[in-house]
Each structure stands twice: as C-alpha cells, then as structure tokens.
Amino acid sequence: MELEDRTINDLMSLGLARYEARVYLTLIRRGSYTAAEVAREADVPRQRVYDVLDALVRRQLATTHPGRVATYSAVTPELALARLMAVQRESVDRLERVSQGLTGLLQPLWFQGREHTDPLDYIEILRDPKAIAERFADIQRQAQRELLTFCKPPFVAPAENTEGMEVVRRLHRAGGTVRALYLDAALDDPETVEHVRRFAAAGEEARFASELPLKLVIADASLVLCDMPDPVAGADSTTTLFIEHPALAGCLRLAFHTVWEDAAPGREPGLVPRGAR
C-alpha cells in the first residue's frame, strides 16, 4: 500500500490528478477493464470514473475498445510517462518564455525605481524617549569628521555618557571637530559643569549661550537630530526628527557656527580646552 501511495504521488507530480493516477495504475494491471471494473478496483466513485477514463484517453495514456460494453486499456508506461514528461517540458518552456518576457518588462522598471525615493524617506519621526536616545547614540557613532551639538535639557543620554566620551576621543584623535554649545544656566549646575570638564578633557570644545533655539545634533554636515517642541503643549511635549539630508544639514551647520561665534567660554578656568574663545 505504501508503494502504491508513493507511485500515485509520483504520477501526480507529473501532472495527473489523484483519480487519474489511481485509474491508470489499475489499468496497467490487466489487459482491459470495463468502467465498472475500474471504478471498483481503483476505488473511484462510479459517477466519476467515466470522466476520468475520458481524460486519460484524451491525454493518450489509455485507449478505449468499443463493443457491447466498452473496455479500456493502459498504454505502455514507458510511452505514457514520456507523454507526461513532454507536457511538463512544454509547460516549463512556456513558463521560461513568460519569465524572460517579464524580466525584460520589469527589470527597467526596477532600475527606474532605484532612482526615485519616497519624498520623505530621509526623515524619521521619533516620539518615544528610548527611541530618541538610541538614535542619538547612532548619530554619534556615525560621525567621522565633525559633531556639533546644541545641548539643552532634558538630556537623552545617561549622565556619564561613556559612549559619547569615546566618540569625542575618537574624533579628536582623528583630527576631527567636536563642538558643543550649552546654556549659560548649565554653569550653575555642578553635575553639568563636571560633564563639560570631562568632555573637554576628551577633546570637546564647549561654549555657552544665553539662549539656544532647540536641541540639535549635526554629524558630518549630513545627519541631523533635532527636537521640535510643541508650541501649544509646551516644552513637555516634543517630537524629534532624524534627517539625512546634506543640504539641510549644511544650512543648520551655518546656523550653529553663527551662534558659536557669539557664544563665550565658561567662567571657570579649565572648563574649555585651550584655543576656545
């Protein structure tokens, strides 16, 4: 029974329906059968057996012998399987032609699609504090030449910000630039003063301004992370944007340096690295 089931499955893989496979397998066991005998031996419903036998005859897998009671015989398996394979090959050839035609049609569209992007796919909108902190860490890691920051509370990075410290050291060793603008009020907070001292020792240049328009990070004049406070809900409600757009980043970089030139170093000696104004 297991061998028969496997044979039926193999015949089905060559394109026969299950009833067709069972009837053909029955027909090869004897010279000829009546429809009623086939139905009984193949366990096919009597009302279906005539349709199945007609299908096998049309596919040249069986022959019919007219008489008072028509009988049916299977063609030799070698010939039957060759005919089934021919149909499969023809189907594969047809699919291959269809595939080649579709490739010729779709490939140019694919290449054209690479030239067009969603008009806003360079902007990522963030509202979850954890996601904002992760994106801040990402933009620091991606910086290779320059990292500019407007530092305003509340800060998303942890107080020690060891990863940010390593970024500052890496950029400083590579001859890059790390500049941060803090609010004057930060000098009244001992924790922030200590933070500025540690980052200055690592290579960050720091200055202080009475006002900063928003929280802002610019990396390599191409990546921007900035917050957009809700003008109605107030400072407690904000949306952060991550933007990968060199033109906008370049414009914001100019704005940063405008504020930087008007800002002043800290009031305490050693708070900023040598060379800062």
Image (cartoon, rainbow, N blue to C red):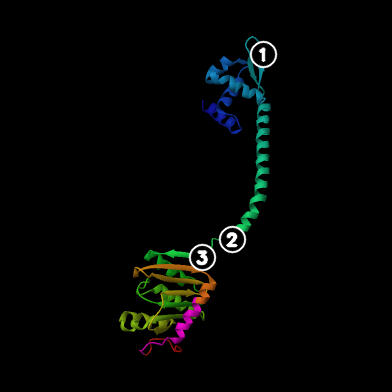
Q: Is residue 241 above or below residue 208?
A: above
Residue type indicated by callout 2: His
Marks 2/3: CA–CA distance: 12 Å
Q: Is residue 149 above or below residue 18?
A: below
Residue on which disc 2 sits: 116
Judged from the image, the secondary structure of the residue bearing numbered disc 2 is loop
Q: Quadrant of the C terminus?
A: bottom left
Left or right of 46: which side holds 60? right
Label for residue 122? 3
**Residue 117 location in percent, x, y?**
56, 61
Nearest to the observer: residue 277 or residue 38: 277
Q: Residue at x 62, y 11 (%)?
A: 69
Badge 2: residue crowd in 10 Å (few <14, some 14–19, many ≥20) = few
Judged from the image, the secondary structure of the residue bearing numbered disc 3 is loop
Residue type indicated by callout 1: Pro
Left or right of 78: which side holds 147? left
Q: Residue at x 44, y 64 (%)?
A: 125
**Residue 78 location in percent, x, y?**
67, 27
Find the residue positioned furthest to the top.
68
**Residue 21 location in percent, x, y?**
58, 26
* Res. 62 image quadrant: top right
Q: Is residue 149 above or below residue 63?
A: below
Residue type indicated by callout 3: Tyr
Q: Is residue 262 above or below residue 122?
A: below
Instruction: Give the mark, 1 or 3, whose residue is nearer the N terminus.
Output: 1
Residue on which disc 1 sits: 66
Q: Main secondary structure of the magenta part?
A: helix
Q: Which residues are magenta?
A: 252-268
Badge 1: residue crowd in 10 Å (few <14, some 14–19, many ≥20) = few
Marks 1/2: CA–CA distance: 68 Å
**In the rendered structure, does residue 109 fall within the stretch colored magenta?**
no
